[in-house]
Image (cartoon, rainbow, N blue to C red):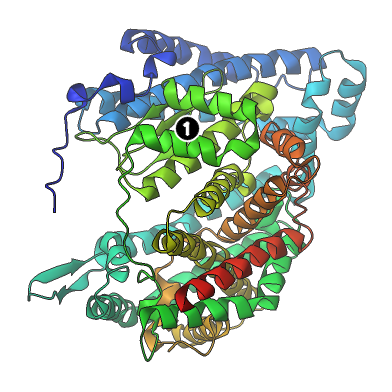
Amino acid sequence: MSEPKKVLKREECNPKYQWHITDLYENDACWEEDYKNLETRIPELAAYEGRLGESAEVFMEYMEKKQEIMKRFEAVYVYANQRYHEDTGNGFYQEMSTKAQMLSLALNSALVFEEPELLAVGKEKTNEWLESTEGMEVYRRFFYELYRQKEHILSKDMEAVLADVQDMSGDISNIFSMFNNADVKFPSIPGKDGEEIPVSHGRYGLLMESRDREIRKKAFLSMYSQYGQYKNTLAATYSANLKNEAFFARMRNYDSALAMELDGGEIPVSVYTSLIETVHEHMDLMHRYVSLRKKALGVDELHMYDLYAPMAEEIEMKIPFEEAKDIVKKGLAPLGEEYLQVLSEGMDGGWIDVYENEGKRSGAYSWGAYGTHPFVLMNYQDNLNNVFTLAHEMGHSMHSYYSDKNQPYLYAGYRIFVAEVASTCNEALLIDYLLKNAKDKKEKIFLINHFLEQFKGTLYRQTMFAEFEKITHEKAANREPLTADILNDIYYKLNEQYFGKDIVIDKEIALEWARIPHFYTPFYVYQYATGYSAAIAISRKILSGEEKALDGYFRFLSGGSSMSPIELLKLTGADMTTKEPVESALKLFGELLDQMEALLTE
């Protein structure tokens, strides 16, 4: 085994592989100048309080000034935080990041009057402005979004009461977070040579991917032993969160908490329920996957702690960054010359901070400010997973690039519902290329396994989470009791339904609901499954050469938030109000299972 490379200090790294942060600000002094200028300009916005209804001209003057200031603020905020992420131990940039955060608070405080004041102006008056005033047309969607939810906004006094309640009820999530991240400790487990292996949230995923089955089992039992001890406290905490959602749904005149949470993104409830129904109709595919996993691992009984163990042999694929760029370009060739040209400019032209250095933020992300190109942070290692990460993050960046290029600042940002579509579409196109060019059977099995794991973890698992949320929120709305035993029973039965008869549903898995942080952000996780389904469906259309597929996809990439997420996806041919995108994705899952079964029996 080769020695791990020494982690270099930032200044020791090759600048060729560092992002061109100077594309935001030439130096820190320029940032400081903009920061101080913004401090003096924020009160200019607050000075419009009480004036927004005077005339269309005053409104436009305010909006133009606000957008000008917001654009500069974005640059200030992104630069400060990306400098901090380059080396989180750098005290100067720690302070810069804190200053940017304080500026954000000041800006939000100065703008708090805007929404209630414009709501008071009323739809009738703003419609008159739109029809009679030159330059107002750009704000049509802005007003549509503002008034769309007006029936769910209460009187000023009631909104003040709800704000106080929201402030208190926010502590429910904090209580869970403090327990889950600070207080709960898991017993260490003995390793093969008797050494103690610590178990933590961060390590648990790695331990569950261990090729040593005893390690997996012990880690599994260690984790759930603690959740079992605190199951009643955690049930009370989760139940309080459900009651909180039901209360706000009733107060805001929604039919359900689900309808309330989806309304922010203008997503019909039918999209949520259709996802669950469609996955139910294709549960046989998940059961086939479980049977295949059992066979591939060669075990008499498959257990829940076997679900993340590698099914494929490790393959040595040392892929330097320069080679990774070429692979990604070849994989994304179906998107056309223009896309590849911009992609190349990004990968070669200072968008990416490639390698790890001392103190650098972990993980990977794409981020940026309107008016400059996006930036990608990576901690690149020379392996296949990092090639997929490069394709994924550049998918986000290209989505931002096209939206920023084609939309005014007001509509450039895209919604969470569509945020993972471009990134996942890139991954799907890349894996199709790699499978078609696999050197041997071993490599093909490795790649198909990678794809199958995405389907299991993203489409099926997140849908199971979404179904658990739907069931429990409905029970809370009906004021039914939700004790630990009841929650355990619901969750256990869902596991039986989703994973089938070829796996032992260990009793400990009934407690998994108690450790999922996303359940405290209600009805969020379904978007992973819908976004993944849409991306797979779009990639299949592009790869099959379907007429107008590329044109529709580029219109989607360029759309920002100028349309609702559902309407934007319809441009690509992926209508999420129907079952077709999810069914298309699941059809591919079935084809991959066919290929894997054939390869394993050769």
| Circle 1 SS class | strand
Rendered position, 143 above or below 437 = above
Give the image location of residue 98, x and y in percent.
33, 29
Q: Using the rendered image of the protein, determine whether residue 47 is visible from the camera's viewpoint.
A: no
Residue 461 in view: yes
State the image quarter where residue 44 is shown: top right
Indicate the position of residue 424 as horizontal and vertical percent values. Answer: 56, 48
Name the spot of residue 314 as percent of width and height, x first. 31, 62
* Quadrant of the rendered image containing residue 272: bottom right
Q: Residue at x 83, y 22 (%)?
A: 137
Seen from the viewer's position, the closer of residues 3 and 252 is: 3
Query: Residue at horizontal 15%, vertical 45%?
Result: 4
Looking at the picture, tell me which residue is in the foreground, 355 or 404. 355
> Left of 448 or right of it: where is 359?
left
Q: Is residue 580 left or right of residue 11?
A: right
The answer to whether residue 420 is above or below residue 344 is below
Look at 74% across and 45% down and name the residue there: 545
In the displayed structure, would residue 520 be above or below residue 120? below
Give the residue type that dot 1 points to: Trp
Which of these two is toward me, 565 or 148?
A: 565
Q: Which residue is mark 1?
A: 367
Q: Nearer the viewer, residue 36 or 361?
A: 361
The quadrant of the image that shows the N terminus is: bottom left
